């Protein structure tokens, strides 16, 4: 059974990321799971990831290393959460 | 027989050419696949006049673009990153456009006010919803239309007829020496004339165009090495990201395999250009300068680069460039003025405007020409600003902001002072005093992300010129004299 993203959101961080995708990309996240691909599925234009990285830096103090990052690393909400945890 | 895009693709399919388009996830389409896809899609578009393509770059979106031309339609590719405000303005110019979209595009149309009134088709829909109304605006027939920011507050629509597209593709093929064994790396949107011409020149040649979904250096490295790329067009934003990496980064190793690359859509300065050329292995880098209204104005070829790395080169073949002063008189060599171009590559006129483009094209760019005829760009004479790889006139931002918040908002970028280089939105409507955070929240779904204001400032009265227009010079001077505290910053955003 698919557990929707909104059911599985764990903390304030998740809500702020969901808000980002809603406000910047106009994406309805209510039918999406934590492991659903966001960029590679075409749900979010992949060029929006530049804005996502600026958002992660400003909101969560993440030190983005452009040298190592790949789209696959931040293609899902789970991936974004892991990236934040590993980059602070 | 007039050459058309469909005949061009068909000829390559019959000649047994291999992959035409490829992209992330090992997606590939041969010339035979592409021809069959275009022919089938074009049949379903026989009754259409205007198509607005709101989708990420992918082979299926390319099929729509090319099939629209084959069906005699006018097709406008829209980059979803340009925001709902500009899309709303563009859609409202057409009577009954067909909006072809993927999931990204559908989400964006959901943010356009009254967006549900437009006929929408998903890229994989077999048959689009039927057209209800004829277009009142005179359309040029088979053409691609590019939207460019206008100083009137509305974006301007620049049509490029199919024949002109093919001419441009042929010129670019010859300029870069493209052959059927080449693989061009597609990083740039088709709503940008450089990205569009790259797509057409590659297909005209029977070569392969590999679409890249991400500008992250590791993704560019994988795409370049995985596809065997031999050519790439990139903007200053992309080159700046790559230059920030260690020269030993895998992206530079992958890009060293290129036969040629370009700096397009802006300049990155002499030292940076030389460093890029050095890291690519030397002798591969072209600079190109043009505008949406004028295909290529100048280009600096690799062999010319060491002698004038700060310039964008001499006039393109068939193009005459000159520098004019405020009285429209020619400037002597090395004296700055406005760049004016005439000759091949000039657009026929804006869509929806009766007057055809006539006489030399005034670019709005300030530059100077050296004794050897090479142009160096120095800045702008109007309100066009550039952030990331996107450009906009401040008047267009103001029109989108007024529609979103119901108040006059003036944007400016102070040159000096504590807020130098920041995009500041100012307003004086009493209803918004103390609600600057809410204002940013209302602007966010409408403006393209790079153009969200860095600061919002409420002011008792906006300075005006004698004719009642916003006086940006006085406003910028006022902001340049302000201290940090009165302005609202990003930390206070919602």
Image: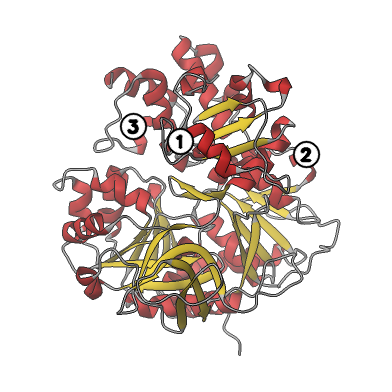
Q: Chain of mark 1?
A: B
Say which quadrant the C terminus of chain B sits in.
top right
Q: Looking at the image, do the residues carrying marks 3 and 1 touch, with CB atoms under 8 Å apart?
A: no
Task: Provide residue B200's location: percent of width, then percent of height.
Answer: 48, 70
- Can residue A71 be seen by looking at this rendering? yes
Q: Taking B193 as reference, is B138 left or right? A: right
Find the residue positioned furthest to the bottom. Answer: B1
Q: Nearer the viewer, mark 3 or mark 2?
A: 2
In the depicted view, which residue is nearer to us: B411 or B294?
Answer: B411
Residue designated by label 2 = B114
Callout 3 and callout 1 share a chain: no
Vertical comparison of B78 with B204: above or below: above
Residue B187 position by quadrant:
bottom left
In the depicted view, which residue is nearer to us: B473 or B74?
Answer: B473
Callout 1 and callout 2 share a chain: yes
Q: Residues within 10 Å of mark 1 (few under 14, many from 20)?
A: some
Residue designated by label 3 = A73
User: Which residue is drawn at the image coordinates 58% and 66% (left, top)?
Assistant: B66
Find the residue positioned furthest to the front. Answer: B466
Residue B177 position by quadrant:
bottom left
Q: Earlier in the sequence, mark 1 or mark 2?
A: 2
Residue designated by label 1 = B422
Task: Provide residue B202's location: percent of width, then percent of height.
Answer: 42, 70
Element carrying mark 2: loop
- For the residues labelled 3 and 1, the Cα–Cα distance comes to 31 Å
Q: Nearer the viewer, mark 3 or mark 1?
A: 1
Element carrying mark 1: loop
């Amino acid at each position: 059974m698919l557990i929707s993203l909104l059911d599985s959101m764990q903390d304030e961080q998740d809500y702020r990321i969901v808000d980002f995708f809603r406000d910047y990309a106009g994406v309805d996240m209510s039918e999406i799971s934590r492991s659903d691909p966001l960029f590679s599925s075409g749900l979010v234009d992949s060029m929006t990831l530049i804005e996502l990285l600026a958002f992660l830096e400003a909101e969560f103090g993440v030190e983005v290393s452009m040298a190592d990052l790949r789209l696959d690393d931040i293609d899902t909400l789970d991936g974004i959460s892991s990236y934040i945890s590993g980059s602070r | 027989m007039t050459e058309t895009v469909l005949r061009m693709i068909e000829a390559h399919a019959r000649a047994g050419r291999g992959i035409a388009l490829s992209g992330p996830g090992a997606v590939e389409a041969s010339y035979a696949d592409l021809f069959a896809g275009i022919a089938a899609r074009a049949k379903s578009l026989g009754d259409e006049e205007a198509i607005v393509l709101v989708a990420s770059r992918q082979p299926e979106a390319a099929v729509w673009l090319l099939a629209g031309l084959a069906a005699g339609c006018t097709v406008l590719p829209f980059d979803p990153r340009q925001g709902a405000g500009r899309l709303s303005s563009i859609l409202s110019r057409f009577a009954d456009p067909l909006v072809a979209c993927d999931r990204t595009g559908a989400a964006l149309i959901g943010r356009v006010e009254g967006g549900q009134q437009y006929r929408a088709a998903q890229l994989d829909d077999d048959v689009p919803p039927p057209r209800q109304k004829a277009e009142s605006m005179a359309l040029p027939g088979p053409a691609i239309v590019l939207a460019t920011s206008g100083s009137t507050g509305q974006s301007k629509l620049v049509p490029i007829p199919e024949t002109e597209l093919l001419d441009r593709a042929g010129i670019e093929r010859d300029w870069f020496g493209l052959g059927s064994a080449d693989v061009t790396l597609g990083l740039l949107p088709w709503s940008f004339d450089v990205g569009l011409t790259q797509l057409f020149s590659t297909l005209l040649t029977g070569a392969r165009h590999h679409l890249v979904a991400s500008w992250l250096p590791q993704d560019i490295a994988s795409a370049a090495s995985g596809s065997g790329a031999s050519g790439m067009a990139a903007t200053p934003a992309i080159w700046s990201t790559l230059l920030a990496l260690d020269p030993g980064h895998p992206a530079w190793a992958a890009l060293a395999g290129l036969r040629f690359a370009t700096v397009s859509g802006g300049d990155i300065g002499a030292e940076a250009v030389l460093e890029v050329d050095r890291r690519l292995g030397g002798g591969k880098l072209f600079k190109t300068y043009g505008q949406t209204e004028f295909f290529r104005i100048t280009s600096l070829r690799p062999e010319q680069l060491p002698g004038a790395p700060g310039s964008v080169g001499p006039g393109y073949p068939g193009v005459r460039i000159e520098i004019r002063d405020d009285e429209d008189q020619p400037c002597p060599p090395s004296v700055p003025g406005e760049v004016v171009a005439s000759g091949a590559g000039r657009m026929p006129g804006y869509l929806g405007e009766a007057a055809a483009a006539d006489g030399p094209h005034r670019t709005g760019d300030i530059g100077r020409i050296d004794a050897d005829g090479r142009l160096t760009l120095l800045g702008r004479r109007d309100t066009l600003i550039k952030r990331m790889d996107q450009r906009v006139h401040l008047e267009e931002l103001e029109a989108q902001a007024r529609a979103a918040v119901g108040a006059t908002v003036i944007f400016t970028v102070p040159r000096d002072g504590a807020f130098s280089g920041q995009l500041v939105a100012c307003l004086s409507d009493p209803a918004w005093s103390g609600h600057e955070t809410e204002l940013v929240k209302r602007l966010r779904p409408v403006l393209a992300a790079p153009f969200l204001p860095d600061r919002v400032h409420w002011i008792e009265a906006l300075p005006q010129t004698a004719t009642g227009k916003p006086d940006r010079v006085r406003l910028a001077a006022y902001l340049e004299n302000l201290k940090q505290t009165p302005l609202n910053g990003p930390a206070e955003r919602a």
